[in-house]
Amino acid sequence: MRIGVYPGSFDPITNGHLDIIERATVLFDRLIVAVAINPQKKAPLFTIEERMDMLENILSKYPNVIVDSFDGLTVNYALKQGACVIVRGIRAITDFEGEFVFALTNKKLAPELETVYLMTKAEYSFISSTVVKEVASYNGCLSAMVPDLVAQRLKEKFGYVK
């Protein structure tokens, strides 16, 4: 069984993330969308439980996708899950340098794991969770950036819907 792990903070999941997930589902028998607990990122907007709930709801139509969370090194988590590949998305060339360093580090730590990069579709290349949260904080239109469920949860989080 070919298992891929797509790690991220998903705070919140965007249409760019969803694009990568949808395309990765056909590449693997099982795709684990793994919410990383990253102490180096400032306080998340959504809790781990809220992020996992949104992911599970949005990804329920994909029978080979599992939503999970982990704390620690991605390579250790991926090996524990029996994965052969870590899936990453790249939006623009600015993402490449950091991703390149991660891939080389991961290869040194776990030579048996590969890292596969999928380029997001052009229409999602400007979207990041940071941009989404800023737009949401001003009650801006999120329809092109996130799934409807996420837009609703963002509006609730920022007090625009009760």
Image (cartoon, rainbow, N blue to C red):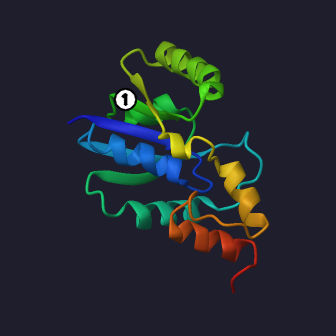
Q: Position of residue 68 (x, y in %)?
A: 44, 52
SS of the residue under disc 1: strand
Q: Is residue 115 left or right of residue 123?
A: left
Q: Quadrant of the C terminus?
A: bottom right
Residue found 30% across the figure and 57% down from its top = 62
Total marks shown come to 1
Q: Is residue 117 left or right of residue 157?
A: left
In this view, the residue in front, 132 or 38, is 132
138 lies above or below 160: above
Q: Position of residue 109 (x, y in %)?
A: 50, 17
Residue found 71% across the figure and 60% down from its top = 45
In this view, the residue in front, 112 or 98, is 98
Report the residue marked by disc 1.
85
Q: Position of residue 54 (x, y in %)?
A: 50, 65
Residue found 51% across the figure and 53% down from its top = 15
Could you say which quadrant of the image residue 150 lies in? Answer: bottom right
Q: Position of residue 50 (x, y in %)?
A: 57, 66
Name which residue type carries label 1: Val
State whether residue 120 appears in this view. Answer: yes
In this view, the residue in front, 43 or 146, is 146
Q: Residues within 10 Å of mark 1 (few under 14, many from 20)?
A: many
36 lies above or below 156: above
